[in-house]
Amino acid sequence: MKRLSIISACEMTRKAFLYLLTPHVDILHTYSSPSEFAAATDEPYGFILLDICNRNREWLSEITGFCQQYHWLSDYHLGLLIDPSCATSRIITEQPGTRKVFNLKQPVQALYDECLAWIQENDDCQTPRHGC
């Protein structure tokens, strides 16, 4: 069973990915912040799409704490959150240690195709806590 969780401060981003990816996953949840996602951890979360494009300081500090808590990002990736170049990337991750950075300057369809291909390539989730 494919599950996808999307964490983004931008409602349009959440709606766009909900529309684009719903036909390709069994369960899709959207969250407006890392804290909202963390509050729902009783559910298996599967693949995570974390949008790091919002430069709001509170949002960035939440993401930093969230990533450190789950050990999803190296110090190098955490550094990208502070750097202005953070506006060009999103990170999708399946589990700690598995991540991919996507360039947002490509057309939306290309970004969507790349996300979907990555989810399908990594569909062999063996960890029960991911709900697979």
Image (cartoon, rainbow, N blue to C red):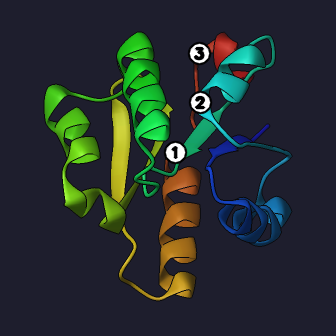
**Is there a contact, CB below 8 Å, between mark 3 and mark 1?**
no
**Three-letter amino acid code of the residue under disc 1:** Leu
Question: Which of marks 3 and 2 precedes in the sequence?
Answer: 2
- The image shows residue 19 at horizontal and vertical percentages of 81, 70
Say which residue appears at 43% left-offset and 58% top-offset: 53
Secondary structure type for disc 3: loop
> How far apart are the alpha carbons under marks 1 and 2?
9 Å
The answer, for residue 23, to whether it is visible in the render is yes
Q: Label 3: which residue?
A: 127
The answer, for residue 123, to whether it is visible in the render is no
> Eyeballing the image, is 57 above or below 62?
below
Secondary structure type for disc 1: strand
- The image shows residue 95 at horizontal and vertical percentages of 48, 26
> Eyeballing the image, is 84 above or below 65?
below
Nearer the viewer's eye, disc 3 or disc 1? 1
**Quadrant of res 29:** top right
Question: Which of marks 2 and 1 precedes in the sequence?
Answer: 2
Secondary structure type for disc 2: helix
> How far apart are the alpha carbons under marks 2 and 3?
22 Å
**Quadrant of res 4:** top right
Say which residue appears at 40% left-offset and 53% top-offset: 55
**Three-letter amino acid code of the residue under disc 3:** Thr
- 85 sits to left or right of 32: left
**Is there a contact, CB below 8 Å, between mark 1 and mark 2?**
yes
Which dot marks residue 34?
2
Which dot marks residue 50?
1
Which dot marks residue 72?
none
User: 46 or 62: which is nearer to us?
Assistant: 62
